[in-house]
Amino acid sequence: MQVRPIADDELPDYIASTMREYAEDKHTNGGVPLEEAHRQAELETAQLFPDGKLAPGHAVLIATDDAGDRVGRLWMARRGESKEFAFIYDIQVEPAARGKGYGRALMQEAAQWSRDNGLDTLTLHVFGGNDVAINLYESLGFVTTDRMMKLAL
């Protein structure tokens, strides 16, 4: 797998698809009404990609296989005020490339990026129903630090 920074001409499509997918996840997995999820996603995206550009301290990486086909993506950033840490905003493996170790390899890239940027903690958020991702993260040594639960009445 090769990893490269996202090209400037790829960024608008990435921003649009990530915003849409994030809103859908907030609705489907987070229970947020769809219209509100889209509104929240738009506001957050505007803050995280000012003027449609990567904010300072953020990186979007594109992963390709040996044939040059895109197999995944990773978006991460420095966060924190008193103690900085790395936060994964988005990690995704293309459906046709799943089950081949690319998710694990992307997570290893995230850890290396964090170390290269002088950070000693890597964090992320995962929705509760994403068992495949949760199993991967736990196998890499991630531990649960917070848990929200809901009961539909």
Image (spheres, rainbow, N blue to C red):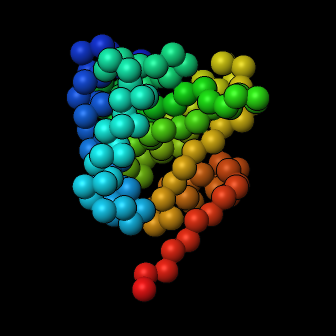
Report x, y in % for residue 26.
38, 56
**Left or right: residue 99 compared with residue 42:** right
- Residue drawn at x 42%, y 52% is 99
Looking at the image, can residue 18 be seen?
no
- Residue drawn at x 31%, y 39% is 42
Report x, y in % for residue 91.
45, 40
Towards the viewer: 40 or 125: 40
- Residue drawn at x 51%, y 54% is 126
- Residue drawn at x 50%, y 64% is 128
Report x, y in % for residue 75.
46, 31
**Left or right: residue 60 compared with residue 79:** left
Snapshot quadrant of residue 29: bottom left
**Left or right: residue 90 compared with residue 84:** left
Location of the N terminus by quadrant is top left
Residue 87 vertical placement versus 23 (above, below) = above
Looking at the image, can residue 28 be seen?
yes
Snapshot quadrant of residue 107: top right
Report x, y in % for residue 130.
46, 61
Towards the viewer: 57 or 150: 150
Residue 153 vertical placement versus 30 (above, below) = below
Location of the C terminus by quadrant is bottom left
